[in-house]
Amino acid sequence: MPVNHRPRHLPALRVALLAALCVALPALGSAADDGPRRNAQSRRGAGQEATEGDQPTAVTPPRLNLRRQDVDLQNCRVHYSISRRAQRVLVELRGLRGDLLYSQETQLGDLRPGARIDVTWPAQSEEIGRIEVTTWDENDASATFRISPFKVEIPHTDVVFETNRWEIRDSEKPKLDEAWALIEQAMNDYGTLLEAALYVGGFTDTVGQPRDNQVLSEHRARAIAEYFRDKGMTFPIYARGFGEKCLAVDTPDNTDLEANRRSMYVLAAEPPELCPGLGNGGWTRIR
């Protein structure tokens, strides 16, 4: 039964789970190294000696079939399949410092190739830095994928830009300086533990043409990201504009609403999906 994961809240920083990019890492475990030799011996039959010409058959990892929509970190669940008969699966949760928080191995009962494999894990009191899922096939060859769910959204006061402009006025810079202090705090807390980056997203209201708002949001997000870069930020910084595609408050067209003219500053281990359905791509690296 899935368990809702409730992330720990830090002072001044809201920490949330992110359906991060899943990286497939095929691997052969030690058991797989012995598998070809053991299988070759079993094919020769009992009492037959190995001949000089016998060579172990190479065992390649099974192919993983995993999509972003198959990862449900909110309910601590992921489903996927592999290209061969699945024998067993190991789920490991590691903290921000790489310490093991949870480990569970489950026998799958010789699932047919392509059969759906459902994996769940219990909610944790500590922040999860990495989820690792390893699956073994009938040859004891394994494939592993990893998920980095780490994400910190930095609270801040939004910069007010002049109409149709993206230059940051001197009167607005103290807002960014306050956010900068919190970003530094978050990076000091987590940046040495995870390879995190800062992601700056820009958003507009529905006044004007959607195409113009898209360009405007891109320039404004970039201006903020460049300000942080010029402050001396040493880790990667990315910017992305969303225009009026992701409204904080749903409004009709040509509605002037300050709540929709906003930005987001997110420290994350993987490119975040800030708006449901818009994916986690499209980020431009500023530093």
Image (cartoon, grey):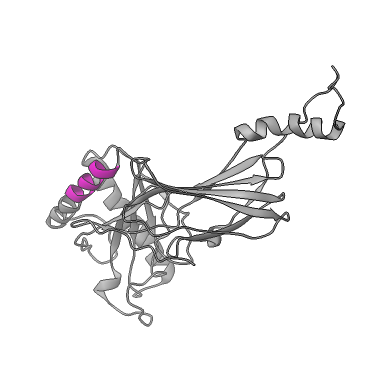
Residue 71 horizontal side relative to residue 269, left or right: right
Residue 93 horizontal side relative to residue 162, left or right: right
User: Measured from the top left, where is residue 131 in percent x and y?
Assistant: 46, 49
Q: Could one spot residue 196 in this view of the protein?
A: yes
Nearer to me, 273 or 15: 15
Residue 104 horizontal side relative to residue 228, left or right: right
Q: Residue at x 24, y 73 (%)?
A: 258
Q: Is residue 59 magenta?
A: no
**For the view shown, which residue lies furthest in the top direction?**
52
Q: Residue at x 71, y 45 (%)?
A: 138
Looking at the image, how many numbered discs can be counted on the residues?
0
Q: Residue at x 37, y 83 (%)?
A: 252
Q: Could one spot residue 58 in this view of the protein?
A: no
Against 205, is 151 above or below? above
Q: Residue at x 20, y 48 (%)?
A: 180
**For the view shown, which residue lies furthest in the bottom direction?**
252
For the magenta stretch, what is the residue range? 180-190
Asked where in the image residue 221 lies, by quadrant, the reply is bottom left
**For the view shown, which residue lies furthest in the front direction?**
47
Nearer to me, 228 or 10: 10
User: Measured from the top left, where is residue 34 in percent x and y?
Assistant: 68, 30
Main SS of residues in magenta: helix
User: Measured from the top left, where is residue 201 in percent x and y?
Assistant: 34, 58
Asked where in the image residue 17 lies, by quadrant, the reply is bottom left
User: Measured from the top left, where is residue 228 in percent x and y?
Assistant: 25, 46
Against 210, is 47 above or below? above
Specify the quadrant that holds the C terminus: top left
